[in-house]
Every structure is written in structure tokens, then in C-alpha cells.
Amino acid sequence: MARPLPPGRGIMIPQEDVRSGTLDDISTQNVTPISLDERVREFEAGLISWALRVAGGNKSKAARLLKIKRSTLGDRINRCGLGRGQSGMSGGDTA
């Protein structure tokens, strides 16, 4: 059975969306700032959710999919605000 790819794989940015120039150029454009930390947290939460869905909610298996320790996965689940009943977590794994 084929597993779904994690989010973010294969995303292409069109050339017209890539702007050249210096930081001075940006200040004169109509650009809305974004929070890198918030975007990274969203991306991380998406990957964790994917791994938990693929692993059927089993945190030990999800951690192996993400190539991180089970304890690290637990810390990151808390940091991303993913709680019980979300992201495919079924609640059974205590390993």
C-alpha cells in the first residue's frame, strides 16, 4: 500500500513569484511581513499530523516515520498545540 507524501514535497515556486533585488527594494514595495516562526510551526504541525495519520495514531511509529525520538515527538506535539482527538491521534500509544 502506497503511503501519502508528507505535505510540502514537490512544491514549485513560479519564476514570476521570485523577486530579485535588495532589502532596500522590499521596503518600498507593498509587502506584508510574515512570521517565520509561525510558518515553521505550521509546517511542523502538518508533518506531525501526516505521520500520526499514516501511523494510525501510534506515536512511536510516527516518530520513526519522522526519524525523531518518541519523546521529541511528544514535545513537538505539545509545542504545536496538537492535542488528543486531533491529527489522527487515537490516544493509545504510551511507548
Image (cartoon, rainbow, N blue to C red):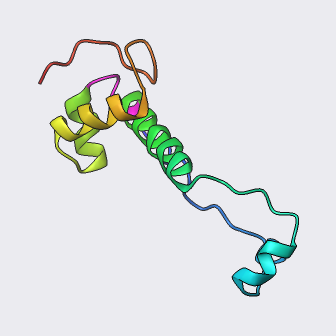
Q: Nearer the viewer, residue 74 or 11?
A: 74
Q: Nearer the viewer, residue 83 or 93?
A: 83
Q: Residue 59 in the image: x percent, y percent?
A: 25, 28
Residue 92 lies, with reference to residue 65, above or below; the image says above
Q: Nearer the viewer, residue 7 or 35?
A: 35
41 vs 90, left or right, is: right
Residue 9: say if magenta. Answer: no
68 vs 10, left or right, is: left
Residue 62 lies, with reference to residue 21, above or below; the image says above
78 vs 81, left or right, is: left
Residue 80 lies, with reference to residue 36, above or below; the image says above
Secondary structure of the magenta portion, mostly?
Answer: loop
Residue reaching furthest to the left: 95
Q: Residue at x 70, y 81 (%)?
A: 23
Q: Residue 91 in the image: x percent, y percent?
A: 29, 12
Q: Residue 90 in the image: x percent, y percent?
A: 34, 13
81 vs 60, left or right, is: right
Please state the extent of the stretch shown in magenta in the rendering. Answer: 54-58
Quadrant, the C terminus: top left
